[in-house]
Image (tube, grey):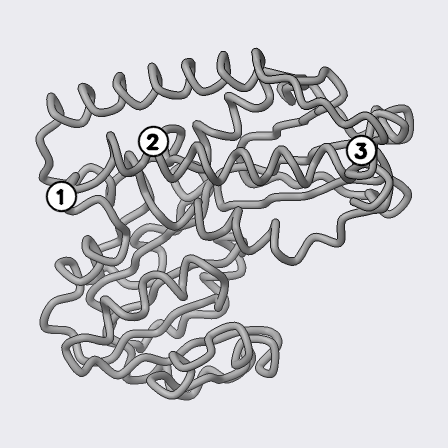
Amino acid sequence: MTPDFLLVHREGARRFSNLENVSHFSFITCLRHVVIVDPDSLASFEAEIETGDVLLAGEEAYAFLLEVICGLRSPLLGETEVYGQFKNAASSFTVPATPWGGLVSRTFKNLFEDAKKIRQAHLEDLGSQSYGSILRRELKGLSRVHVIGSGHLVQEILPWIAKDGTSIVIHCRDLAKAEKSLGELAAKVELVSLDERRSLAAAEAVIVAAPVSAKWLRAWLPESAPLKTIVDFRADSATDRFAHAVNDRAIVLDLPELLGRLNTNQTLLQERKRGALDAIEASVAARARHVEYRPFGWDDVCA
């Protein structure tokens, strides 16, 4: 793996900004922001790197990405949501016609091949290891659920919480974009603007799946809403808390509390995780030994 494959990782809810003049690929989840940078643009990007951010190159960068998209760095071991998020980001990425663009394209192809093999061999049949399956259990019996956000996480959980005929209202900033991203799922929900709060008068549950603040949530949620459950998927939900500030009767589940309700065989999970990590180490070593012979370099020229 060439050292020209550079990756910068920032954990938490904070995001990199000012990337307009940097040749890069960006991948964002609720827990992290990953930027793959063209070495020629690194000097322009260095000002964005802060204490706590991690710069990786070559084999280390490849191994890290494999761990992320295989769900080994997620609260839910082997979760599929992060793989889908990475796949969507990669498919929408405009690959530049440069040697670096060719490197990124080939690396992504290898990542998907390796991730598929590792998932099939070590990370299938792990039980209730998806946010949707957990939410369905936590929201059982509730008839009206409101969701803040319409991103990939929402797309993953909607089929689960819509199975029991639950009325679902999604609040988002861009209705047209949300309808397009939800596709066929849009017909199963009511899409409204974030400013539309009248329907909250009957809300029994609220799912927070967008990077908003606790202060904003307290102002947004009416005190009179008959809320029974609030599920907070924000990365900083454990520190930027709004528990019981909205409704003393509502159960508030932040991300750590939600994960704590998982009923899984931890011994099995740890064995599977060790097996997957060993497989990643083997995959990285195999990729490092592999040398492509391209006498005319057409892949780089035409990437």
**Which residue is labeled 1 in the image?**
127
Q: Is residue 61 above or below residue 131?
A: above
Please name which of the two marks, 3 or 1, marks the residue nearer to the observer: 3
* Element at label 1: loop
**Which residue is labeled 3 in the image?**
100
Q: Residue at x 18, y 27 (%)?
A: 269
- Whichever of callouts 3 and 2 sits on the residue coming sooner in the sequence is 3
Q: Are marks 3 and 2 in contact (CB under 8 Å)?
A: no
Residue type, numbered disc 3: Trp
- Dot 3 crowding, Cα within 10 Å, few <14, some 14–19, many 20+: many
Please name which of the two marks, 2 or 1, marks the residue nearer to the observer: 2
Quadrant (top left, top right, bottom left, bottom right) of the N terminus: top right
- Whichever of callouts 3 and 1 sits on the residue coming sooner in the sequence is 3
Q: Is residue 248 left or right of residue 22?
A: left
Residue 23's x, y, as percent? 84, 40
Numbered badge on residue 118 = 2
Residue 279's x, y, as percent? 35, 19
Residue type, numbered disc 2: Ile
